[in-house]
Image (cartoon, rainbow, N blue to C red):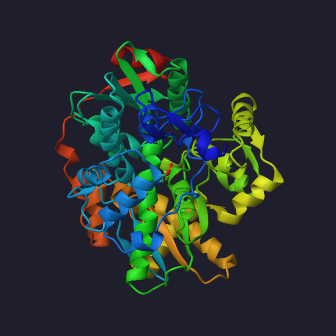
């Protein structure tokens, strides 16, 4: 029996369905709607499709379509078992982004910047988190689920607001967001604390993002069947959820299609992508695009001073036993990048036991090392560079002075990595730098990088930035100042589990 056959399960009603997702740590097969509802697998692993890349996908046909149709094709392929994907995509995106193209590709110097931040909360996470509630609502219907779904989310800033925006007042769901107290920007904090909705809870935690994420993971594992109460099932909106990762594959195609349309490449020519990386979801989506057959060259992993991924991709040793830096690009301040587990799974030839051992070692000892063969396979697809705080500021200033384009701190990290990559790379391929935030999200840091004083509050800083750059403050941010603070909870990290019990 082949792997595909093993993965086929027979439903009790006699209908055969493809259960394509297994846990990276070895747990049994589930369908895409089930994987989306669960988020994390019961054994603590992430859901992955071992057959990704083995089913044929018409890349060229897809690239010729409009953005929403491309999304429909890609998501239907990655998440089989959602019969009305076209409708779900339409509901998620139509009219909700300030750009018709969803993620516009902008020429900056001799490379390209893919702007991912034109969604309803001005965060790149909107791309995925507009879609996830649609997938979850459909999955509840498909599986006949009766219980309430409560989304637990740990956020380093942007995920929280984008998830709240996606899930507030969605019938049958609730959402609880934890963020590191004083560990997100003023604007991000305002965005979350002013969130309206009957089914939302927002809570600051005294700790860093990794503390929040570990505690949320521990809550998940403390309910192996996902049931936090008799009629409540927990799920996740973090990029560990396959329903969050899959929509991110789309913009790699959109960027490639834009280059084709503009005659910058011919079909089949490889394009390199530089990705500002934290939890490894964004860049892993690029690797998925490559598995589908998109001509992706190298994926360049850009890190800030928290260079755990740079070291790992250079040496194969993942070692979290190091100092944690709070940087000006806080969404990348991460020492444990959850989605890397999926890449390890594939790089080891879908060896779940190997993955489980590595993850257990990471938990107990703080490090693991992959084999030379695994590292070689990963290095064929990935390169990695990091960027200090001084270099981040210099990168913003240089980009603005040389090209007139104003990047935010996260994009600046990626632009710095792009420079380093280019110095070594002789392929001459087109280079797309993913931009994950508007500069108005981090006005103080951007002003300081430009050598300007950053007096006043975040809103005065935004206005000053608008004057200097000639850009308009994004609508999602401009109106925040007048909004009322609705959430005031601050807890210790040890209290996360009891907070969840209280709120579900
Ligand atoms: C989430 C985020 C990232 C990191 O993306 P990952 O998928 O976690 O690697 C980078 N920049 C910004 C602004 C983000 O919000």
Does residue 236 sit above or below 92 in this rendering? above
Q: Is residue 349 left or right of residue 74?
A: right
Q: Is residue 193 left or right of residue 57?
A: left
Front in this rendered view, residue 428 or 483: 428
Does residue 477 sit above or below 28 in this rendering? below
Does residue 447 sit above or below 320 in this rendering? below
* Residue ID at (76%, 51%): 316
- In this view, the residue farthest toward the left is 482
- In this view, the residue farthest toward the front is 14
* Residue ID at (58%, 80%): 429
Front in this rendered view, residue 3 or 306: 3
Q: Quadrant of residue 139?
A: top left
Which percent across, then down, holds residue 274? 55, 66
Q: Quadrant of residue 288?
A: bottom right
Front in this rendered view, residue 9 or 42: 9
* Residue ID at (70%, 39%): 355
Which percent across, then down, holds residue 322? 70, 41
Does residue 494 sit above or below 127 in this rendering? above
What is the tally of numbered marks visible in this picture? Answer: 0
- In this view, the residue farthest toward the right is 372
- In this view, the residue farthest toward the bottom is 263
The N terminus lies in which quarter of the figure?
Answer: top right
Which percent across, then down, holds residue 119? 29, 56
Residue 436 visible in the picture = no
Residue 152 visible in the picture = yes
* Residue ID at (34%, 19%): 504
Which percent across, then down, holds residue 386? 63, 60
């Amino acid at each position: 029996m082949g792997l595909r056959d093993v993965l086929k399960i027979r439903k009790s009603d006699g209908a055969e369905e493809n259960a394509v997702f297994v846990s990276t740590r070895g747990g049994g097969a589930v369908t895409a709607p089930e994987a989306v509802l669960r988020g994390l697998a019961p054994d603590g692993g992430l859901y992955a499709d071992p057959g990704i890349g083995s089913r044929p996908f018409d890349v060229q046909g897809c690239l010729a379509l409009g953005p929403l149709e491309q999304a429909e094709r890609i998501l239907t392929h990655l998440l089989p078992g959602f019969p009305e994907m076209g409708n779900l995509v339409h509901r998620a995106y139509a009219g909700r982004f300030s750009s018709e193209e969803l993620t516009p590709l902008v020429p900056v110097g001799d490379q390209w910047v893919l702007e991912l931040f034109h969604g309803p909360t001005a965060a790149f996470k909107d791309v995925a988190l507009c879609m996830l509630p649609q997938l979850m609502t459909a999955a509840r219907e498909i599986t006949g689920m009766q219980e309430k779904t409560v989304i637990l989310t740990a956020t380093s800033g942007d995920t929280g607001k984008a998830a709240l925006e996606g899930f507030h007042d969605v019938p049958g769901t609730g959402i609880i967001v934890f963020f590191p107290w004083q560990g997100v920007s003023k604007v991000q904090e305002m965005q979350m604390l002013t969130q309206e909705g009957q089914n939302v809870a927002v809570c600051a935690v005294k700790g860093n993002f990794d503390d929040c994420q570990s505690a949320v993971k521990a809550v998940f594992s403390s309910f192996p069947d996902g049931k936090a109460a008799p009629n409540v099932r927990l799920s996740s909106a973090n990029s560990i959820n396959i329903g969050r990762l899959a929509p991110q594959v789309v913009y790699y195609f959109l960027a490639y299609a834009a280059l084709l349309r503009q005659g910058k490449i011919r079909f089949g020519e490889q394009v390199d992508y530089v990705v500002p990386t934290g939890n490894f979801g964004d860049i892993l989506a690029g690797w998925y695009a490559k598995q589908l057959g998109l001509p992706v060259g190298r994926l360049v992993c850009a890190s800030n001073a928290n260079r755990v991924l740079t070291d790992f991709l250079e040496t194969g040793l993942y070692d979290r036993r190091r100092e944690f830096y709070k940087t000006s690009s806080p969404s990348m301040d991460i020492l444990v990048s959850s989605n890397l587990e999926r890449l390890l799974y594939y790089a080891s030839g879908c060896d779940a036991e190997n993955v489980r051992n590595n993850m257990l070692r990471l938990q107990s000892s703080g490090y693991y090392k992959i084999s030379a063969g695994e590292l070689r396979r990963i290095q064929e697809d990935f390169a990695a560079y990091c960027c200090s705080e001084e270099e981040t500021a210099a990168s913003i200033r240089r980009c603005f002075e040389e090209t007139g384009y104003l990047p935010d701190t996260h994009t600046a990290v990626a632009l710095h990595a792009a420079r380093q990559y280019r110095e070594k790379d002789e392929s001459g391929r087109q280079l797309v730098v993913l931009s994950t935030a508007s500069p108005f999200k981090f006005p103080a840091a951007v002003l300081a990088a430009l050598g300007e004083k950053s007096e006043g509050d975040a809103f005065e800083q935004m206005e000053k930035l608008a004057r200097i750059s000639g850009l308009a403050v994004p609508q999602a941010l401009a109106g925040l100042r007048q909004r009322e603070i609705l959430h005031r909870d601050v807890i210790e990290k040890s209290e996360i589990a009891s907070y969840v019990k209280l709120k579900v």
